[in-house]
Image: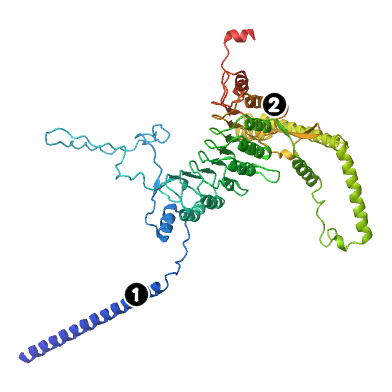
Amino acid sequence: MEESQVSQSAWKRSMITRRSTFVANKIKMGKKLEKGLKEKNASAVSQDEENPNKTPEPYSCTGNFQADFTELCRRNSMTYIPPIIPRARPPTVMGHTESGKPDKGKGKAPQAPVEPDPDPEQDLDGEGIEAPPKTFTIKEKFEYFKPSVQVEMENFDKPDTVTEIYIRGWKIVEPIMEIFKQCWPKMAKLHTINLWNCGLSGEVITILASTITEIPEMRNLVLDGNTVVEENWHELMGEESPIQNLSLRHCGITDKGAEQIGQALGSTKRCNTKLISLNLSGNRITDVGAEHIALGLRMNRNLMSLSLASNFIGDKGASKIAEILSRFPLTHEEVVERRKHFSEKDFPERNKSPPGSRRDGSKDRPASVRSQSHMDKDKKGSKASAKKKDPKGKDAKEEEKHDKTKKKEKEDKTLTKKASIAADTKGTKGKGKGKDKTKQAAQEVEDLSGGEVVNPLTDVADFIDGQLWVSGNRVLINLNLSRNKIAESGMNNLLKAMQYQTTILMDNKSGGTGLMRIALLKNKISQEHEVMRKLNDIMLHKDPYYKQPPQTPDVQSTT
């Protein structure tokens, strides 16, 4: 027994010794592994320090504006990253929906037991302490003035549904704009950008102009309160720009910027086909700038609302705008473009030569052919000079006859289309699907009456005193000229333009409805003036919100 106990104790001691040796070896291996990892990390850090110019992997935006903007700002080592916050809204009344109506459910859900209000706190004197209101939250000092990006979202639970972006009162420099240029094109639902008083520069405007063309649903752009020295606002109205509503209020725009804006609106070569509303109120535009904008409206048939309020426009600028609204003669350059349009429309393949032909290579043709072509050119030149001497020659009469024939064919097609639409509408009454077809027919009638966009160069022209006169802009329906320097002369020209539009619309409405609202308050003429009263009477009945007062029985009996 004693020997067995001794052997067991010796075995236990040997086992303890082995276990302690194993643990000691494990600890040593762990220390060696840790030391190796430290050396490896130190070598990696030293390699990074040796290559400080090594660029990280490029970040690809996902459409989540908050995550993308924060990550890009962090990569650019910004000390302060503006937070993305939802735009403030007024508090809603409990128990009501967003539309203001009480929420009426089909079934009444079981109401949770109402917990009793806690006892009001009391001060040392035993008086109740008023609880803080629950309609607002208290923030730290100057929190409101820190830069932030306010957003509107379709669904606040989904961060990739941002539809509108608002930035207020903090300067946007080029690095920030470059970050926005990476984020915004990936946002599938973004349609409105509002940058108020952000100290934009010409370079930032250029970056913004290239960014908006890549945003899929971009429609509205508001840049009020930004004075740009370069005045390169026309870059936002390029051929690829998707902007429909552009607001540039209080941007310090002068005649220089107005000239570029007018050229972007329209010219003989190109015109803007997307912009619907343009607000230029509160700037420094004079008669010169108003004339340039009027020149842009000669060829533009897409802009429907224009505001030039609170500028320095006088009688000359107002008269030029009135001329564009009534009718105007085509210049020599416009007449040349008009004839090009007609030739391309009648003979689209006339100027195209087949491949391998020697039409353009005059050097390869025989001398007899070249001499004959020169003789033909001389004959054509002599005929052209003879025709120029007689401005009312055969060409002018034939062109006038062609315009009248075209006008008659267009009116016949319009009447035929309207008659067929009316017949389809009449036949669908009393049926289940009649409402949809009626709406569709009404939309087609509206398109025929005022929605058709016609190139003014190809419109019907009248030959008067050796010049071709075309009808003015009748697509513009809203014009604001309030708080300018227009006197009696300019108002009289605007009155004549409105009388002309009223007269021509009785015969032909295919070119648009003409001005329906015009604001002329606070100019250099009283509202009690005879010209102003006539102008207000004409525009009163054209206002779409005007309701004729009901007639009394006495008036009905007399009529």
Please state which of residues 520 and 302 is positioned toward the viewer in this rendering.
520
Residue receiving disc 2: 500
Please state which of residues 430 and 232 is positioned toward the viewer in this rendering.
232
Using the image, determine if residue 9 lies above or below residue 56.
Answer: below
Residue at figure coordinates x 14%, y 36% from the top left: 123
Please state which of residues 114 and 215 is positioned toward the viewer in this rendering.
215
Where is residue 136 drawn, in percent x and y? 31, 39
Where is residue 370 drawn, in percent x and y? 91, 58
Q: Quadrant of residue 361?
A: bottom right
The three-letter code of the residue at mark 1 reads: Asn
Q: In the rendered view, does 180 fall on the left or right side of 233?
A: left
Where is residue 421 drawn, in percent x and y? 69, 33
Q: Quarter holding the N terminus?
A: bottom left
Residue receiving disc 1: 41
Q: In the rendered view, does 186 fall on the left or right side of 375?
A: left
Q: Quadrant of residue 16?
A: bottom left
Q: What secondary structure is found at the residue carrying circle 2?
A: helix
Where is residue 440 drawn, in percent x and y? 63, 35
